[in-house]
Image (tube, grey):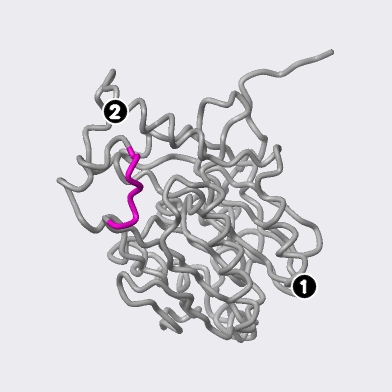
């Protein structure tokens, strides 16, 4: 099985422009022989980096409000059909796709950090909303739920995916391991110092392949009309540097992108290595003790109201 990890910049805060990058990357990866492709966290329409580099917690700052509104306007409405072309491309190319999006809530005024799983034959099979946004992200995103904690079947393979620091959450990882994936996708805003270590750890702990994808974002990628552009330029020049890496079950690195390179990396996965690696350690099989330690997972999709007509 050949997999691809995308390390590119979005067209920042431009949903349609970034979807164009997604479609082009899918076509390129398919031409390169990939059967599965992973994109970075909230790649469409971009990661809200200004939360870390400006005073995002100002309660009533007009530029912060304007930046938020611009981000909300560019977010993805799955029900509206914003991803229809990506679904069609997945089908045409036979490419299982994990795509990070800023997902607009049903209310229209909140955003989830979501990871969409798109099967080439069945379309969108999962929308996993990040369980707990990290630090400054909590000013941007709502808490998710467990509805997307699902490993998906793709041919003879099971694949799973988590957003960024969810990959550091032992119980979230366990919920995925328990479903028997051989390939796990980890999405990141673009931070090699974080993504490399945990990607290797997850691969070794879960005895599976890990495909990590991180974005690139620099000064030149900030749009001229972004309300906090000057503050971003004053604070930093490189907000995301990638960190895309593909790791084998023994923790060895099969492919990695250089920092700030705009590229797609590939690796050919021998899934027999997963079975071999679990010979001496299977965290949810023969090396587990369910009589002593158990995990309960609520996969209910949560909403603000339940209507009975």
Residue at 66%, 50% (x, y): give it.
83
Image coordinates for residue 185, horizontal then vertical, percent: 54, 64
Which one is earlier in the sequence, the residue at label 2 or at label 1? 2
**Quadrant showing the C terminus:** top right
Up-down relation of residue 21 to residue 302 (above or below): below
Would residue 36 appear left or right of 235 to someone viewing this image? right
**Quadrant showing the N terminus:** bottom right
- Which stretch did the figure color magenta? 220-226
Q: Nearer the viewer, mark 2 or mark 1?
A: 2
Q: Residues within 10 Å of mark 2 (few under 14, many from 20)?
A: some
Would residue 94 appear left or right of 105 to someone viewing this image? right
Image coordinates for residue 273, horizontal then vertical, percent: 58, 85
Image coordinates for residue 174, horizontal then vertical, percent: 54, 56
Where is residue 259, by image quadrant?
A: bottom left
- The overriding secondary structure of the stretch rendered in magenta is loop
Would residue 119 appear left or right of 252 to someone viewing this image? right
Residue at 41%, 40% (x, y): give it.
133
Where is residue 228, by image quadrant?
A: top left
SS at badge 1: loop
- Residue at the top extreme of this rendering: 309
Task: Examine the structure image and report whether residue 221 is included in the region drawn in magenta.
Answer: yes
- Residue at the left extreme of this rendering: 234
Q: Which residue is mark 2?
A: 63
Up-down relation of residue 43 to residue 225 (above or below): below
Q: Which residue is mark 1?
A: 155
Q: Nearer the viewer, residue 160 or 238?
A: 238
Residue at 49%, 69% (x, y): give it.
6
Up-down relation of residue 196 to residue 269 (above or below): above
SS at badge 2: helix
Q: Nearer the viewer, residue 188 or 84?
A: 84
């Amino acid at each position: 099985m050949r997999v691809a990890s995308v390390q590119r910049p979005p067209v920042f805060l431009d949903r349609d422009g970034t979807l164009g990058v997604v479609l082009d990357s899918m076509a390129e990866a398919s031409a390169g022989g990939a059967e599965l492709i992973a994109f970075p966290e909230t790649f469409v329409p971009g990661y809200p980096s200004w939360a870390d580099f400006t005073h995002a917690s100002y309660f009533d700052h007009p530029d912060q409000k304007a930046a938020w509104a611009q981000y909300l306007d560019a977010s993805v409405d799955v029900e509206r059909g914003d991803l229809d072309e990506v679904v069609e491309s997945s089908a045409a190319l036979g490419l299982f796709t994990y795509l990070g999006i800023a997902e607009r809530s049903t209310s229209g005024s909140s955003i989830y950090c979501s990871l969409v799983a798109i099967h080439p034959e069945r379309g969108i099979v999962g929308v996993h909303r990040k369980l707990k946004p990290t630090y400054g992200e909590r000013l941007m995103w709502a808490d998710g739920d467990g509805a997307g904690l699902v490993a998906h079947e793709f041919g003879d393979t099971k694949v799973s995916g988590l957003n960024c620091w969810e990959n550091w959450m032992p119980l979230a990882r366990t919920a995925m391991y328990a479903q028997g994936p051989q390939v796990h996708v980890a999405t990141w805003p673009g931070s090699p110092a974080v993504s490399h270590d945990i990607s290797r750890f997850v691969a070794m702990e879960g005895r599976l392949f890990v495909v990590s994808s991180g974005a690139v974002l620099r000064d030149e990628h900030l749009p001229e009309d972004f309300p906090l552009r000057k503050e971003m330029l004053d604070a930093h020049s490189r907000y995301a540097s990638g960190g895309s890496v593909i790791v084998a079950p023994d923790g060895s690195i099969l492919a990695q992108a250089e920092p700030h390179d705009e590229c797609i990396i590939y690796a050919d996965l021998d899934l027999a290595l997963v079975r071999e690696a679990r010979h001496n350690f299977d965290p949810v099989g023969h090396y587990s003790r369910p009589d002593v330690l158990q995990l309960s997972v609520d996969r209910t999709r949560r909403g603000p109201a339940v209507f009975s007509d």
